[in-house]
Amino acid sequence: MKNLAEEICSFHCPRWHELPEISLYMDQVLSILEKALSIFVNENEEKIATAAMINNYVKQKICIPPIKKRYHREHLAYLIIVCITKRVLSISEIYALLERLLAKYSIAEAYDLFCDELEYALQITFNGCTSREGLDMEKDAVVGILRATLLAFANRMLAKALLSSEK
C-alpha cells in the first residue's frame, strides 16, 4: 500500500471531459464527489459533501441551481472546487474566486485550470517538486489567487498528515 505522500502525489482530479455528460440525481452527485475526493477525508472528519451542503451552496449562489432536480457537469465542477477550497476560504471568498475565474475563463477552462493547480499544489507540497514555471502576477492575478489557495489547501493537508503521524 502506498504511503500518504505517494497516494496524494498520484491523485488525479477528474478533468472536465472526464465528468459525466448525463444529468444526475443528488445521490449520484454525492457518490461521484465522495469517490473523486475521498483521499482528502479522514475517518474522523465529516463527509466531503452532503445533500444539505449542496443545497446550501445553491442558496448562497456558490453553485448554479439544478435543473428539474438534476445536476450536470457544470454542477460537479462547481462542487469539486467548493469542496476543496472551503477548507481554506470562506464562502464569500470562494464566491469571489469563482467570480474572477469565470470572468476570465469558461467553466470548462476554469475547472481544468483548478485541477491542474490542485495537482501541482499537492505535488509541490508533498513531493517538493519545483519544476513549474514562474507566474507573472500582473498578467494573471486570478491564477495567482487560485494557486495560493490550493497551495494553502495542500499545506494544510500536509500539516494534518504530519500531526496524525506524531501520535
Image: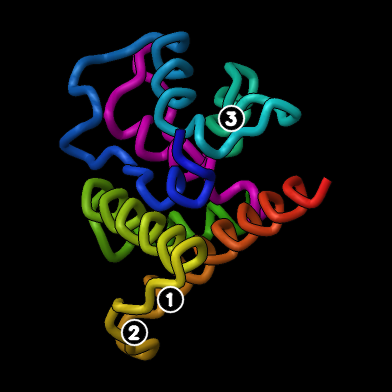
Residue bearing mark 1: 144
Q: Is residue 18 above or below residue 140?
A: above
Name the mark nearer the viewer: 1 or 3: 3
Residue at 71% across, 51% down: 160
Percent position of residue 9, x then y:
40, 52
Residue bearing mark 3: 48
Residue at 29% across, 24% down: 72
Percent position of residue 124, x then y:
44, 68
Of label 1 and label 3, which has the lower sequence position? Answer: 3
Under circle 2, the secondary element is loop
Residue 68 in sight here: no
Q: Amino acid at mark 1?
A: Gly
- Of residues 19 and 163, the one nearer the viewer is 163
Label 2–label 1 contact, CB within 8 A: yes
Q: Is residue 68 magenta?
A: yes
Magenta segment: 61-90
